[in-house]
Amino acid sequence: MKSKALALGLLCAVAAAGSANAQPAAPAAITIGTLYASSGPYASISMPVFDAFKLWVDQTNAAGGVEVKAFGKKIPIKLVAYDDQSSTATAATLYNQLITQDHVDLLVADSGSVLTSVGVPIAKEHKQFLFDVSGTGAAFFTKDNPYIALMSDPVSTIWPHYISDFLADQGVKEGVKTVAILYSTNDFTGTQAAALKGFFERDGKVKIVYYQGVPTTTSNYTVLINNIAALNPDAVLELGYVGNDIAFLRNLQDSGEKFRFVFSIYAGTEKEEIEKNVGISAMNGIYSYVPASDYEYKPDVGMDQKAFHAAWDKKYPPGSGVAFGANAIYGYMTGLVVQQTLATTKSLDQMAIHDAVFGLSGKLKTLDGTFELRDDGAQIGEVTPLGQLQPEGKDKLKLVAVYPPDLANGKAIIGK
């Protein structure tokens, strides 16, 4: 009897050891949690990201799910999404809910630096890796936080360098000597303004005669434009969100003031939305970033720009309410990074997710360009060219890449 009991005990021990070493059972679904803003000042950048991410989820599930290396099979995606209504307080509550109550496998931030800012410390505290779609604020990326990576935009400290390079190079040759910088005081545009100030001071070729931050809620720029005009700068750089750009460009046209070079972030990156709200004449000649929605890169993964635009128009027909632009690219591109992460990660452990994401750096090319990360998770690839909105036929503008020379597909027209 003792020998039988001993044998039975040994069998149980072997079975237990085998069970301990066995691969965890595959989940019924990969749960991805995210936030979006259906209303408020950030809805115009948030909804295109969310709709594009949903497009990727729908396409992936229609193909049987996402390939997950850790389980050797395709698994459907379950998307858990909440509306933060452009409120950072609401977003903080909902980020916590996705992590502590929904226990999502992967966490994707809302669009932009403001709504990402509250998610960064929460994700770090809970050791949950954050797929940061477009929160470019420099303060998000620190050596002591391995739980973040920026997906689709360069970090704000390097993103605007083509603006200063262009003015210090071609602008100076055309007689541009002075610049005014007007920015909204948030992590996104405030960091870009500080970076530009540093670039101009370093180069010493273009003098800053005006440097002013205003609340992101600013909706009337008439007095600010008059104050700038009194200093007669050659170039004016207005750095804000979509609502800021709309108000600034409207007020600039109404004022009748003319500057030789005017830059606005969203005149190019969300061209359809700005054009709808300010009209073509107010945008003619404005400089902006050239997003992947207006520039064709050759991807190794996923659809190229033309195919994605066609898929977008099929799912969200023109006039349906959400404009196609840079943020649509950002949402889809984030889906592609998630896809490649799951295809290479050893497990769903959050540090394994970190390792898989960083393993893609410098190797992944999407319709948004080359995905490349700094050690702290900041994006240093995908740097957008500087462009200018120029006439194309009657009542139409095209965004022409004008700098740097190796990415240019047209020539800048600097005002007299």
Image (spheres, rainbow, N blue to C red):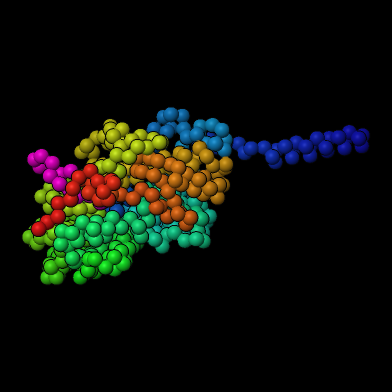
Residue at 30% in and 43% down = 292
Residue 163 lies left or right of residue 152; in this view the side is left
Which x, y percent locates residue 340?
47, 39
Closest to the observer, 202 or 395: 202
Closest to the observer, 125 or 37: 125
Residue 34 sits inside the magenta stretch = no
Which x, y percent locates residue 288?
23, 52
In the displayed structure, 158 sits above or below 329; it is below
Q: Quadrant of residue 264 in the image?
A: bottom left
Q: Residue furthest top?
A: 63
**Residue 110 in sight from this viewpoint:** no
Which x, y percent locates residue 154?
36, 53
Part of the protein shown in magenta: 386-398
Residue at 55% in and 47% down = 352
In the displayed structure, 88 sits above or below 58; it is below
Residue at 44% in and 51% down = 373
